[in-house]
């Protein structure tokens, strides 16, 4: 079965830049595997020379398949025969993807997550389940989707596009003023009998779930993410793991501005220029890690005084908002 990886970079330059970082991490770890890479984009940016000729560009028109998260609801129109692993552009890959394809094999549409049967997840889940006469639905991080091209996967995404039109009426709340692909595809999966791979922390995780210190090196495959144990104030009680080493790290939200992500972006760029490892590590520490650490510690130390004298600053709009 043909295997493919696909990402989307539409609307803003920031998504293209993140996609290039993802592609470099893919090529670093998957050169010896028969896996193709595709990028869906409405941007006119040329590929860097180290990537050109190694991946396929799927060109679309602006807003042809919606904006923001809505483009994910059309994945069935982009994928080739065989199996496709969609990965969000703000992810990095830390080992070969072969093991992930093997674990998902045979599932028409799947994700990494668990089931939810109540509570709040972009809407009142109990009310939504009752409305559709179902007992539960998958809950997951939409950083990855696995799809095998067949009639079932087509039906799932057709259902998702119908549900999107009724998003507000169903009772879902919006993310960045837009319909959230996760709850739509979750409901579409459940209505079409599709199941998630139960999350064990080995396929994908993120620094939002693991708020403790994390240690990563994309070139060596080092990735240790820590969710401090209770009663640590950084503990995320909704996340069931204390330490994970996932194949894919998802730098969702503002975590692409964190020095950890910026270090790995530099490593990949420098390696594409054949810079020696000693030089790469030196630049990562002296130009990225240490200055950011000093700045963060300084801000943490004087933040209470700043708030007392001048109050709270307004929250800046995310550069990701279209």
Image (cartoon, helix red, strand yellow):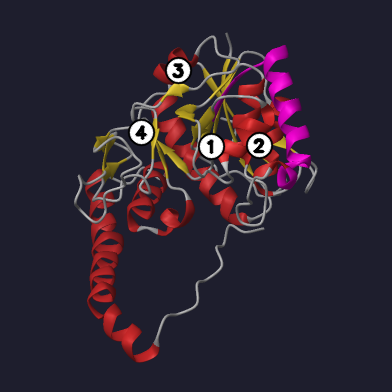
Helix, strand or loop at label 3? It is loop
The quadrant in which the N terminus is found is top right
Q: Which residue is mark 2?
A: 72
Q: Which residue is mark 4?
A: 94
In the image, which residues are magenta?
Answer: 145-169
Helix, strand or loop at label 2? It is helix
Give the foreground label among 2 and 3. Answer: 2
Q: Which mark is residue 33?
A: 3
Residue 68 in the figure: left or right of residue 14? right
Is residue 176 placed above or below 65 in the rendered structure? below
Helix, strand or loop at label 1? It is loop
Q: Which mark is residue 8?
A: none
Real-space Cα separation, disc 1 to disc 2, in angstroms: 9 Å
Real-space Cα separation, disc 2 to disc 3, in angstroms: 26 Å
Real-space Cα separation, disc 3 to disc 4, in angstroms: 15 Å
Dot 1 or dot 2, earlier in sequence? 2
Observer-nearest of 182 and 168: 168
The quadrant in which the C terminus is found is bottom right
Dot 2 or dot 3, earlier in sequence? 3
Real-space Cα separation, disc 4 to disc 1, in angstroms: 18 Å
């Amino acid at each position: 079965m043909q295997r493919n990886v696909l990402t989307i970079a539409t609307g803003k330059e920031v998504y293209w830049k993140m996609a290039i970082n993802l592609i470099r991490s893919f090529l670093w770890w998957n050169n010896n595997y028969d896996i193709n890479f595709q990028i869906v984009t409405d941007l006119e940016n040329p590929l860097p020379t180290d990537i050109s000729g190694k991946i396929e560009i799927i060109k679309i028109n602006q807003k042809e398949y919606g904006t923001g998260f809505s483009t994910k609801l059309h994945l069935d129109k982009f994928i080739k025969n065989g199996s496709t692993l969609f990965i969000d552009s703000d992810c990095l890959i830390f080992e070969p993807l072969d093991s992930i394809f093997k674990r998902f094999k045979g599932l028409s549409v799947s994700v990494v997550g668990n089931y939810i049967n109540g509570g709040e997840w972009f809407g009142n889940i109990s009310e939504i389940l009752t409305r559709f006469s179902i007992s539960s639905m998958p809950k997951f991080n939409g950083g990855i989707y696995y799809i095998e091209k067949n009639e079932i996967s087509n039906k799932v995404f057709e259902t998702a596009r119908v549900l999107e039109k009724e998003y507000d009426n169903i009772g879902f709340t919006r993310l960045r003023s837009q319909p959230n692909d996760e709850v739509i595809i979750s409901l579409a999966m459940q209505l079409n009998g599709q199941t998630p791979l139960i999350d064990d922390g080995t396929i994908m995780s993120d620094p939002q779930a693991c708020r403790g210190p994390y240690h990563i090196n994309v070139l060596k495959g080092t990735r240790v993410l820590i969710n401090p144990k209770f009663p640590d104030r950084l503990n995320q009680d909704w996340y069931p793991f204390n330490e994970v080493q996932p194949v894919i790290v998802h730098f969702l939200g503002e975590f692409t501005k964190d020095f950890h992500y910026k270090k790995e972006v530099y490593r990949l760029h420098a390696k594409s220029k054949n810079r020696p490892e000693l030089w790469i590590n030196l630049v990562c520490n002296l130009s990225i890690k240490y200055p950011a650490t000093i700045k963060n510690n300084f801000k943490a130390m004087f933040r209470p005084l700043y708030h007392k004298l001048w109050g709270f600053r307004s929250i800046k709009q995310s550069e990701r908002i279209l």
